[in-house]
Image (tube, rainbow, N blue to C red):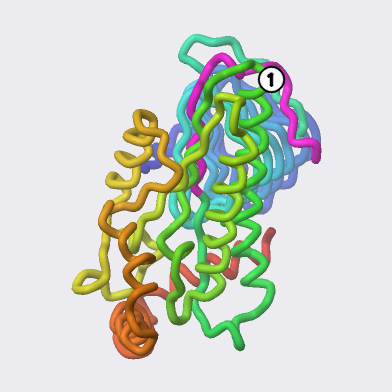
Amino acid sequence: METPKTAEFAHIGKSVIIKGELSGSEDLYVDGQVEGNIELAGNRLIIGPHGQVRANVSAKGVIVQGKLDGNIRATERAELTKSAVVTGDITTQRVAIEEGAYFKGKVDIQREGAKTDAVKPASTSGRTSGSTSSRYRLTASNAGTGDSGPIAEIPVELVRRTFETNVFSNLELIQHAIRRFVDAGTRGRIVIVSSMGGMLTAYGLGAYCASKHAVVGFSEALRDELAGTGVTTTVVLPPAVRTELTAGVKLGGLLPTVDPEDIASAIVASCTHRRAVVAVPAWMRAYEPTTALVPDRLVAAIRGRLTRDRVLRTLDTSARSGYEERVRGATRKA
C-alpha cells in the first residue's frame, strides 16, 4: 500500500497530547497521543507509527501505522499497515490489512453510496449498530501470524498471541457473520483460510500448526451445526505462501509454495462448489490419505526434508528477525 505524502497534512507531533473532541476540514496526520473522538468528514486521517489514539475516528480515508483503540468509520477506504495495532470495528467500502498488522474487531463492508450508521464503541457482545445482513452473502476470514521455535522452549505468551490472532479473532468474526446470515435467512457462505499446517505438523512451527488445527476443527464443526440453515462453511488450506510470514524460509523444491492471489482465487471458486475443504493446490488433499498408508519412518524423512532441514540448516534468521520482532512488539503492546 502506498501511503499518501503528508507535507500538506495538518500535523500532531510525537510530543503532543490531546484529550477531547477533535474535528476539522483538512487532512490530519497524528503521531502523538489523542484520547476522545476524531471527526474529519470528507478528509483523510493518518495515524503515524508513533501515534497512540484512544478514540472512535471518522474520515473519508483512514490509514493506521501506529496504535488505535477505537472504531473506524471510513467512507471510502481503511488501511492497516504492518506496524498497526488496532482494537475496534471497521466500517468502510474498502479495507486493506497488511501481513503483520494486529487487528481485533469486526469489518462491515458497505456498498458504495450506502449510508453508514455512526460507529458506536465496540462491545464484548460482538454486536454493532444497524443491520447489514442483506448487503453481502460471503464472509472470508483470514488471520495468520506465527513465531518459530521448539514447543518445549517457545514462550507461552507467544503461543497465546498466536491463538488469539489465528483462532479467536477468526471465531469472533465468523460468529458475527453467522448471526447476520441466519437472522436474515440468507444462504450465506463462510470461507475460512487456515493452512495445510492444520492437517499436518512442521518442525519449529508447532504453535502455528496447532492453531491451524483448531481452525480446521471449528470450521468442520460449524458445517455440521449449520446444516439446514442455508449457511455453509469452507476451509481453505494453502501450503507455504509467499508473504512476510515465510520470511527467511527457503521456499520451493519439495515444499509446495503459492501466492496470495492463488488463495483469493480459491475463495472465489468455493462460492460455486461449496466444498467443505479446499486445498491449494488441489493435489495437496492427497497428503493425508497417502501418509496413512506409508511407513512412519518414511513420513518422518519426508517431513524432515520439507520443514526440519529448512529450520535447522537453511533458515535465514537475519531475514526473519524483522517479522518476528514485530510479532513480539505487537504482543507487548496488545
Q: Main secondary structure of the magenta part?
A: loop
The amino acid type found where label 1 is placed reads Asp
Coordinates of residue 248 in the picture (x, y in percent): 34, 74
Q: Is residue 117 above or below residue 315?
A: above
What residue do we see at 70% from left, 44% from top? 69
Q: Which residue is mark 1?
A: 183
Q: Quadrant of the N terminus?
A: top left
Q: Is residue 270 above or below residue 209?
A: above
The span picked out in magenta is 123-142
In depth, the one of 62 and 7 nearer the eye is 62
Where, by quadrant of the figure, is residue 296 drawn? bottom left
What residue do we see at 40% from left, 61% from top? 196
Coordinates of residue 13 in the picture (x, y in percent): 61, 47
Coordinates of residue 183 in the picture (x, y in percent): 69, 20
Residue neighbourhood size for the residue with mark 1, other residues' Cα within 10 Å, grouped as few (<14), some (14–19), many (≥20): few
What residue do we see at 76% from left, 40% from top? 35
In depth, the one of 330 and 282 nearer the eye is 282
Q: Is residue 311 above or below residue 275?
A: below
Q: Is residue 185 above or below residue 156?
A: above
**In the orientation shown, which residue stands out farthest toward the front?**
293
Q: Secondary structure at mark 1?
A: helix
Whether 33 is among the magenta residues is no
Q: Quadrant of the C terminus?
A: bottom right
Q: Is residue 2 left or right of residue 189?
A: left
Q: In the rendered image, is residue 309 in sight?
A: no
Q: Is residue 120 left or right of residue 45?
A: right
Q: In the rendered image, is residue 118 in sight?
A: yes
